[in-house]
Image (cartoon, rainbow, N blue to C red):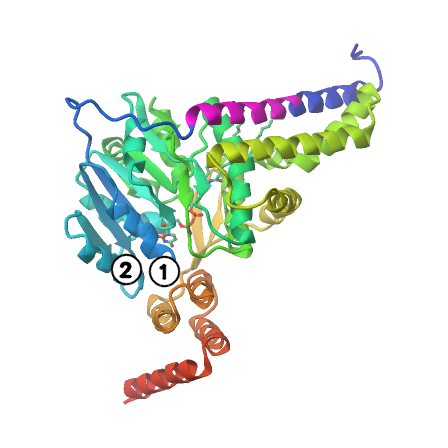
Amino acid sequence: MLDPLSPTFTVDVLALGIIIGWLFVWSMHLIAIIYGKYRLHRKVVKFPAEHPYPGVSILKPLMGVDPHLLGNLETFFTLNYPKFELLICVEDESDPAIMIAKSLIEKYPGVNARLFIGGEDVGVNPKINNMQPGYAAAKYELIMISDSGIRVKEDTLLDMVSYMRDDIALVHQMPFTYDRDGFAATFEKIYFGTIQSRIYLSAEFFSIICHTGMSTLMRKKLIDEVGGIRSFGCYLAEDYFFAKSLRDRGWKSCISSQPALQNSGVCDLSSFQKRLSRWVKLRVAMVPFTMILEPLSECLILGAIAAMSANYLFKWDFTVFYLVHVLAWFLLDWILLCTVQAGSVPFSKFAFAIGWLFREISGPYLFVCAVMDQTIQWRTRTFRLHWGGIAEEIKPKIKLSKICAARRHTSCAASACAPAHPTFAKLSRFAYESTHSSATIRRGVRRLILQQLPRKRAANLDQKQRAERSKKAE
Ligand SMILES: CCCCCCCC/C=C\CCCCCCCC(=O)N[C@@H](CO)[C@H](O)/C=C/CCCCCCCCCCCCC
Ligand SMILES: O=c1ccn([C@@H]2O[C@H](COP(=O)(O)OP(=O)(O)O[C@H]3OC[C@@H](O)[C@H](O)[C@H]3O)[C@@H](O)[C@H]2O)c(=O)[nH]1
C-alpha cells in the first residue's frame, strides 16, 4: 500500500504513474489494431439513386516538379466521381509544374480542370497563399485539399464523400504511403504505418483532433463562415486549425476508409527527417503537452522507465522486462502495419526489422534536435513559430526572379535527363528546398549536372547557357 508519510512516497507514486501510463500505451496499440481493422479499407458505400452526389472542388497546390508528379496528378483526372472540378494552383509563373498541369488538361478535355497561376498574398502560409485564387473560384459545396504528392484510386473521392454525414464537416485520409522501392520508402512506410497510425487511430477513436491536411474534404460554407481559407493563413499548420475551428463550432471530423497514398518522387531519408522535424515543431507549438508525452511514448524510452519502475515496485528483472517490452512492441507494430497496408508490404520482414529499429532509435534523437531549433524551414522559406501556432516568416523567400532563373536551369537540366533519372529528383530537391542564395543554387545545380550527365550533354547544356547569357548581355 502507498503510505503518504513514507519517505519514498513520491518515488512510489512516480513509479506507479509510469506503470499506468505504460499500460495505457499498450491499450493504444490494441485500440489502433482493432479500430484500424474495423475502420480501414471498407467497401465504398454508394449513394442511393435518389440521393445526388454533392459537387467537389479539388484544390491541388503545386510547387516544383518531381518524377512522380505527372502520374500522381493524372490519377485525379481519372477519378470516378460524377461532379467535380480540379483547381490546380501554382504560385510561380516559371514553375515547370505548369507544363505538367497543362499537358494533362489538354489530354483530358472532358475533365473540368483549371489552372491558377500567381497565388495571392493572404498570410504567412505559402500553401494557403497558393490555393487562395483556386479557392475563390471554387463553385461546389465541398472542397477537397490534396497535396502534390498524393495519388488517388478511382473511388477515393466516393469513399471520402460517403463519410460526410450530416454531423460531419471534415473527412480526412490517414497519412500512409504508396508502394515505392528503396530504404527511404521502406522507412516512410514504417513510420506512417506504425507510430503515426497508432496515434492517428487512437486519436480518432477518442475523438481527439489529429488532422494532417494532405488529403482533406470540407464543407465550403463552414470555412466561408469564418472568412475562407485566408483566415487560416497566419498558421503554418492550417490543417490543425481547420479541424479545430469546425470542432469549436460543434461539428465533427473523421477519417475515411482509404489511407492517403503519398507518392512524392523526392524520397530520401534527409528530406523525410526534415519534414518530420517540421511537424514536431508544429505539434509542440500548437499542443504543448506533446513536448513531454511524445518522447515518453517512444518504445525505447518508455520501455526503459517502465522496466525501472517494475524493478522498483515488483522487483522484476530489468533486462527481461525491457526485452519482452521491445519484442512485443515490434510484433504489434508489424500487425498494425499489415492492417493499414491491407495486404503484403513491398519489403521483407528483415527490412522491416532494420527500418523499425532505425525509426525507434532515430525518433527520440530527431525530436530533441527539432525542439532545440526554433526555426522552421519549409521549401524555400524560413519561419518562426509562436506558442499557439501563429507563424512569422523570418527569412523572406529568395527573390522570385532569381529563383526562377535557378528553376529554369533545373527544368532545362531535367529535360536533358531521362525523367526517371535520379539526377532529376536531386536537382528538383536542391533547387526547391534550398534556402541558399540563387547564385549558390545555380552553382550547385551546374555542379550536379556536370557530375552526373554524360560529358557531351553537359557541355551542350553549358554552351546553351553561355549563348543565352551573351544574348542577354547584348
Ligand atoms: C499517454 C500517451 C499519450 C500519447 C501522446 C502522443 C503524442 C504524440 C506522439 C507522436 C505523434 C505522432 C504523429 C501524430 C500525427 C500528427 C502529424 C502532424 O504533425 N501533422 C501536422 C502537419 O500536417 C499537423 O499540423 C498536426 C496535426 C495534429 C497535431 C496534434 C497531435 C496531438 C496528438 C495527440 C494524440 C493523442 C492520442 C492519445 C489517445 C488518448
Ligand atoms: O511554399 C509552398 C510549400 C508547399 N506548398 C504545397 O503544400 C503542399 C504540402 O507541402 P509539402 O509536401 O512540402 O509539406 P507536407 O507534406 O509536410 O505538408 C503537410 O504539413 C504542413 C501542413 O500545412 C500541410 O497541410 C500538410 O499537408 C504541397 O502540395 C505543396 O505543393 C505550396 O504550395 N507552397
Q: Position of residue 415 (x, y in %)?
A: 34, 71
Q: Amino acid at mark 2?
A: Ile
Q: Is residue 34 magenta?
A: yes
* Residue underneath mark 2: 100
Return the residue nearer the eye: 350 or 332. Answer: 350
Q: Is residue 227 left or right of residue 240?
A: left
In terms of secondary structure, where does tag 2 sit?
helix
> Residue 219 has which mark?
none
Of the image marks 1 and 2, the number of the one nearer the N terminus: 1
Residue at 39% in and 42% down:
214
Q: Position of residue 424 (x, y in %)?
A: 42, 66
Q: Amino acid at mark 1?
A: Val
Is residue 419 placed above or below 126 in the rendered structure? below
Q: Is residue 254 left or right of residue 10?
A: left
Query: What is the crowding at mark 1: few (fewer than 14 residues within 10 Å), some, or many (at least 20)?
Result: many
* Residue underneath mark 1: 65
Query: What is the crowding at mark 2: few (fewer than 14 residues within 10 Å), some, or many (at least 20)?
Result: some
In terms of secondary structure, where does tag 1 sit?
loop
| Residue 306 placement: quadrant | top right
Is residue 123 among the parts visible in the rendering? no
